[in-house]
Image (cartoon, rainbow, N blue to C red):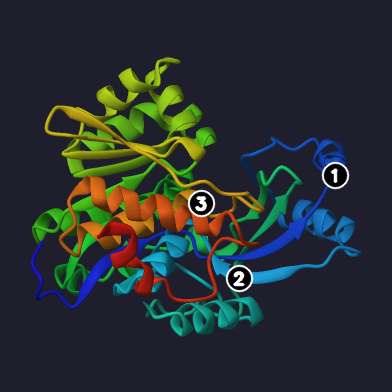
């Protein structure tokens, strides 16, 4: 990838303020939530969840899947610019300042005060470190093709888009616009499947999208198996890898698989005592994208992604609080 570009990665996703809480298993059961996955909610439903959490300590972070990945790129020592929609409200201003404070450019215009509120995601983490998400998309569903900056894409080494955008019509068009502009400017494009519930609804769409526009794909083992309708993970990795130049399939504590040029490699994980799995896959993608845009081969990039993800699951929330750039040489060599 050319070294002269202004940005390493141009990211596109749903801009969400994460509201983080630790709960017990009974809390998830009481709400009848799909454990370990994401549930879309109206504002009233989410407000009811928050009311039940009034005695729990809560924390805020600027999030959304692709935004967490962009933060990991910045904390690795890379540069990035992010497109997502927030409103001119308290959460929106928090989001803009928080993202820029960690070194990610965020230039999309704030929606007017009369628009929907900034999207929020209540992230419920149980004692086994599994996370269950209750999401109100809010104004993020108004991310429009006109919000995608073609000039910034032209000055980026790589474009990265999250699968969550595919769930609403206008962001879906923005997803396609980002890929079209990437192709126009000769910029490689990466896509993440994001969540098993999206595979249930859009497996064929994703196959067509990846086949037409994408050079790189990210997913986890569950998503890969659902996408390929098979329990044989290695055959699923191979099938997905044949759609693109480069595929990364994570397998929790077992590390990940890398498929390129007709061959598959396994890259081992790092031993951890997990506290919170929120953002682990996003951190992995950020580590990999940093590596690829800084000259690492895919296996070394995956090793850095595995390490970054291992550090994230040992902390509360979807991202780390400090830079990781000083660890790169020790991990990669």
Q: How many residues crowd mark 2 within 10 Å: few (<14), some (14–19), many (20+)? A: many
Could you tell me which residue is drawn at 16 percent across and 39 percent down? 245
Q: How many residues crowd mark 3 within 10 Å: few (<14), some (14–19), many (20+)? A: many
* Residue at image mark 3: 280
Q: Is residue 88 visible?
A: no
Tag 2's secondary structure? strand
Who comes first in sequence, dot 3 or dot 1? 1
Q: Quadrant of the N terminus?
A: bottom left
Q: CA distance from mark 3 to mark 1?
A: 23 Å
Q: Is residue 132 above or below residue 157?
A: above
Q: Is residue 171 visible?
A: yes
Q: Quadrant of the C terminus?
A: bottom left
* Residue at image mark 1: 27
Is residue 241 toward the left or the right of residue 303 in the image? left
Could you tell me which residue is drawn at 45 percent across and 64 percent down? 67
Q: How many marks?
A: 3
Residue 17: give x, y in percent of width and height. 60, 67
* Residue at image mark 2: 61
Could you tell me which residue is drawn at 17 percent across and 57 percent down? 182
Is residue 120 toward the left or the right of residue 199 in the image? right
Q: CA distance from mark 1 to mark 2?
A: 22 Å
Tag 1's secondary structure? helix
Pick whichever, 278 or 312, lies toward us: 312
Who comes first in sequence, dot 3 or dot 2? 2
Tag 3's secondary structure? helix
Is residue 210 toward the left or the right of residue 109 in the image? left
Q: CA distance from mark 3 to mark 2?
A: 15 Å
Q: Is residue 141 above or below residue 70?
A: above
Residue 75: give x, y in percent of width and height. 40, 72
Classify residue 66 by image quadrant. Answer: bottom left
């Amino acid at each position: 990838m050319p070294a002269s570009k202004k940005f390493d990665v141009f990211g596109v996703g749903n801009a969400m303020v994460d509201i983080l809480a630790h709960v017990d298993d009974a809390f998830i059961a009481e709400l009848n939530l799909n454990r370990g996955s994401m549930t879309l909610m109206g504002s009233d439903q989410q407000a009811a969840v928050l009311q039940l959490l009034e005695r729990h300590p809560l924390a805020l972070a600027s999030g959304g899947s692709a935004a967490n990945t962009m933060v990991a790129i910045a904390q690795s020592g890379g540069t990035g610019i992010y497109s997502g929609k927030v409103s001119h409200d308290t959460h929106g201003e928090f989001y803009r300042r928080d993202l820029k404070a960690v070194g990610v450019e965020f230039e999309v215009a704030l929606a007017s005060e009369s628009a929907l509120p900034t999207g929020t995601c209540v992230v419920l983490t149980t004692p086994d470190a599994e996370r269950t998400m209750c999401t109100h998309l809010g104004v993020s569903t108004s991310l429009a093709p006109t919000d995608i900056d073609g000039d910034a894409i032209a000055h980026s080494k790589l474009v990265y888009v999250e699968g969550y955008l595919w769930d609403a019509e206008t962001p879906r068009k923005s997803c396609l616009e980002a890929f079209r502009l990437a192709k126009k400017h000769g910029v490689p494009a990466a896509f993440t499947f994001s969540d098993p519930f999206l595979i249930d609804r859009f497996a064929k769409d994703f196959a067509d999208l990846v086949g037409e526009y994408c050079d790189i794909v990210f997913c986890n083992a569950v998503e890969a198996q659902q996408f390929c309708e098979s329990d044989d993970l290695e055959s699923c990795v191979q099938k997905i890898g044949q759609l693109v130049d480069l595929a990364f399939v994570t397998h929790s504590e077992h590390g990940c698989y890398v498929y390129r040029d007709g061959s598959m490699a396994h890259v081992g994980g790092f031993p951890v005592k997990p506290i919170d799995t929120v953002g682990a896959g996003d951190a992995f993608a950020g580590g990999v994208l940093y590596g690829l845009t800084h000259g690492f081969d895919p296996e070394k990039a995956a090793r850095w992604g595995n390490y970054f993800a291992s550090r994230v699951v040992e902390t509360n929330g979807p991202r780390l609080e400090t830079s990781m750039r000083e660890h790169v040489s020790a991990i990669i060599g």
